[in-house]
Image: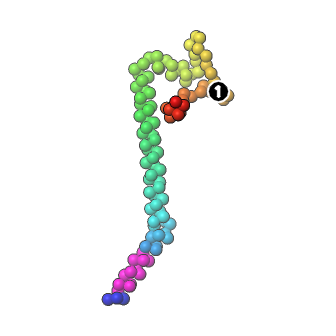
Amino acid sequence: MRREIVLALAIVVSAVGVAAADGQTGIRAWRKVRSDLATAQKRVGELEARIESREGEAAALRKDPLALERAIREDLGLAKPGEIVVRGLDGRAPQPATESAQAQAK
């Protein structure tokens, strides 16, 4: 009876050792998969927030003709009479500040 317990314990310890040491299918692989999953879930959250923001912008452009006109002018780098177009050193118009940058500036 004692010998069977020792043998069973040795088998369990060996299995745990193999699981810990095996980089392909063991604990390391499981931890990497968990890490990759967390990274992917974070990215999905960021993309969903970006989609929501873009949908809000699209709705605003559909409702407000002046906002649509302004967006088109900004994209094309055009100005109304009396307006001044400011370009960066790379020749592109500066991008509007993000919400987080505006919040930090306050």
Residue 30 place in picture, x, y as percent: 44, 62
Residue 99 place in picture, x, y as percent: 49, 32
* 37 relative to 48, above or below: below
- Residue at (50% x, 66% y) in the render: 23
Q: Where is residue 84, by image quadrant?
A: top right
Question: Can the viewer see residue 8 in this picture?
Answer: yes
Q: Main secondary structure of the magenta part?
A: helix
SS at mark 1? loop
- Residue at (59% x, 21% y) in the render: 77
Question: Can the viewer see residue 98 in this picture?
Answer: no
- Residue at (42% x, 77% y) in the render: 13
Q: Residue furthest right?
A: 89
Q: Neighbour class for label 1 at 10 Å: few (<14), some, many (≥20)?
A: few
- Residue at (43% x, 73% y) in the render: 16
Q: How many labels sit on residues?
A: 1
Q: Residue furthest front?
A: 106
Q: Where is residue 26, by image quadrant?
A: bottom left
Residue 50 place in picture, x, y as percent: 45, 36
Q: Where is residue 75, by image quadrant?
A: top right
Task: Let me know if residue 86 is in the magenta part.
Answer: no
* 92 relative to 10, above or below: above
Q: Residue furthest left?
A: 1
Which of the pair 100/26 is nearer the observer? 100
Residue 5 place in picture, x, y as percent: 35, 84
Task: Let me know if residue 6 is in the magenta part.
Answer: yes
State the scheme by which the image is colored.
rainbow
* 97 relative to 40, above or below: above
Image quarter of the N terminus: bottom left
Inspect the image, locate mark 1, and give the three-letter code of the amino acid beneath it: Gly
Left or right of 89 on screen, residue 50: left
In the image, the segment drawn in magenta is 4-15
Residue carrying label 1: 88
